[in-house]
Amino acid sequence: MPPITAFDTLDKEIIKVGGKPVVLEALWSGDTNGWYLLLYVNIIRSRFLIKREEQHLLGEVTLPEDSAYYTDGRPTVAMVAEELGKWAAQKYGLTFYFPSRDNADEDCPGWAERHLGVHCEDCNKLMLLRESSHLPREVCYSCYLNRKSNESLRNADPSDHGYNFCLSKNEEYIKEGYCTKFEDFTIAPFIQDKVKARLTSDIISTITLDQEDILVLKGQLETTLEGMLLAYEMPQIDERKRRFIGTYKMQYGGKEYVLMDRHNDAHTEIASYISNIKTAEKAIAEGYTYQFFFKQGITYRDDAFLRFINYVCKGETSLFAIHQKYARQLNTTDISTTLEKLEKIGCIVTKGEQVIITRLGYCIV
């Protein structure tokens, strides 16, 4: 499946299909590795007096490396798809169909199924009715999550899950990873005893692994990886799956390994170990320590405020902007109390009317 990075790439794929393009569809697809935004073209192919409509997969909309996943609260890849759709509509006079532009959602009907769709009560997005006793039928899944989010915000539900891993040196912090559960870190089995021994009762407990700890960890990772590589097998991809599964190469120990980018747990694990060894090598060579952040007593409201300041406002905003952001869900007292708590535990500082996230606040969201 070719990556669609620009209109030139898209145009070549449309031309390759042939026929008269009438509809370009942008539809989300997801698996355990994440979300993919796929482009399909519906064409009319004429042969004598017979016209036949066909759908063809063109490829996945792909961003350049180091691109931000979100831009102004929307998936960046969706904004790229919109531009591609505009160009295609201008050149071919086709219809661009993109039912879920603001968030990833695979419960939207394709072009041929759109007559089966109903509109979400909250966002008006066209969606397919789901058969679930656990989810409401009147809203899409994204809006259901928004409703749950607002409820958790109002109730200040506990939100101690989620662990960030940073490289730290002096006042420099580099985020290296995030897991909902600590045990999901590849390195967790090797360091969990040290981490448990160093936990404190603070609302935010910062656990540091020094250079000696990292040296020991690196050796353990290398030993485990060497065992995995003894069982390494080159990818064997069924021809029918080649457009959905790609490969990439990683270097380790002077050798090159070709790995599948999905649907191969052994390859995923090998890649993770190689990446973690490289991280350890970087830390040792450049004098970084590892830092993990454990939370106990952080609420969903605390987390939401920090994420708003850090990600939406780029680390600094005004008291007015925060009050305006949460005016519909919270009263003035709730907002002020939350800000006071975050400042007390060292996650933000206020300077007059300005609110600035601290290094600690940055590291836990």
Image (spheres, rainbow, N blue to C red):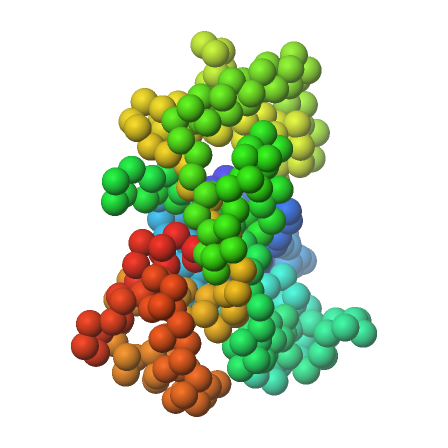
Q: Is residue 259 visible?
A: no
Which residue is situated farthest in the left direction here?
A: 352
Q: In which quarter of the image is the C terminus?
A: bottom left
- Which residue is rendered at x = 46% and y = 66% of the image? 303
Which residue is situated farthest in the top direction here?
A: 254
Corner quadrant of residue 288 = top left
- Which residue is rendered at x = 49% and y = 21% of the image? 216
Report whether 130 appears left or right of 12: right
Spot occupied by residue 135 in the image (x, y as percentages of width and height):
73, 74
Spot occupied by residue 267 in the image (x, y as percentages of width and height):
61, 27
Spot occupied by residue 280 in the image (x, y as percentages of width and height):
42, 27
- Frontmost residue, 255 versus 4: 255
Q: Is residue 156 visible?
A: yes
**Count of picture labels:** 0
- Which residue is rendered at x = 59% and y = 37% of the image? 192
- Frontmost residue, 254 versus 164: 164
Spot occupied by residue 95 in the image (x, y as percentages of width and height):
49, 67
- Frontmost residue, 114 versus 285: 285
Report whether 349 appears left or right of 282: left
- Which residue is rendered at x = 59% and y = 64% of the image? 105
Q: Quadrant of the N terminus?
A: top right
Residue 212, placed above or below residue 227 = below
- Frontmost residue, 109 versus 246: 246
Report whether 136 appears left or right of 207: right
